[in-house]
Image (tube, rainbow, N blue to C red):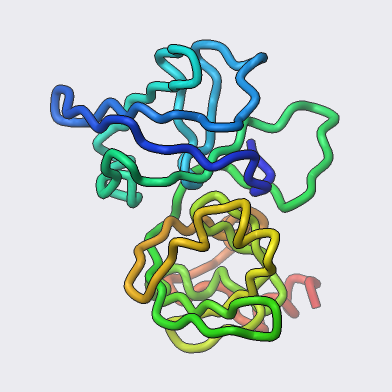
Amino acid sequence: MFTGIIAAVGKVNAVEPSGGDLRLKVDAGSLDLSDVKLGDSIATNGVCLTVVEIHGSQLSFDVSRESLDRTSLGQAKPGSSVNLEKAMAVGDRLGGHIVSGHVDGLGKVTLLEPSARSVKFRFEVPAELERYIAEKGSICIDGTSLTVNQVGPGWFEVNIIPHTMEWTIISDYQTGTVVNLEVDLIARYLERLLPGQTDHGISRDTLAKHGFI
């Protein structure tokens, strides 16, 4: 599990095809590796990956076909910047929200504009994920825990403060940038636990019927 608070920005050193999937080699930059060992989990642009090799500051990961099909890691190239976060330890502060590192789908930047000292970003979202994204709820974008400011048909917006722009890869985003999205786990499990759900998801009437509102 992760918190969505990015610990460092790394750089992709190599992307090596291997038996139909990839070996990804990443320079971890300023990430503290003193307690990292083989088999540990590192969120890389929001994707939970297992460390299979450590050479100095370089971490190697095997990226499965499933991860390549569902995330943006298949587009990674040498020199690409990636958000990095070590798995949360018991007793750590949960500064963001509970993040699993399991990407639900891909979004795309459709608008960015200054908003005082922040930058407002609008993201296109897949239709099947819309119902899990709520105004003032949490969303994980490339591993970064963010608050949803507004939602609309097929899109949502977030405001990025200067600190987040400086310490994550969001400063590299442009119109058309593809990002990894993980929706709030609570929304996922709430829908699964309620009986009699259909493809239309949770309605206000259903929540009222089962005592949630």
Q: Position of residue 193 (x, y in %)?
A: 63, 56
Work out whether residue 194 can be spotted: no
Name the side, left or right, on which 73 lies relative to 53: left
Q: Give above or below for 32 relative to 68.
A: above
Q: Residue at x 44, y 61 (%)?
A: 172
Task: Give the residue drawn at x 69%, y 69%.
Answer: 161
Look at the image and tell me whether residue 161 can be seen.
yes
Q: Is 60 on the left-hand or right-hand side of 142?
A: left
Identify which residue is drawn at 46% across, 20% down.
Answer: 51
Q: Quadrant of the N terminus?
A: top right
Q: Position of residue 181 (x, y in %)?
A: 47, 59
Which of the 4 image quadrants contains residue 208? bottom right
Residue at figure coordinates x 59%, y 39% from the top left: 8
Query: Which of the image's four quarters has the C terminus?
Result: bottom right
Q: Quadrant of residue 82?
A: top left
Relative to 108, residue 188 above or below: above
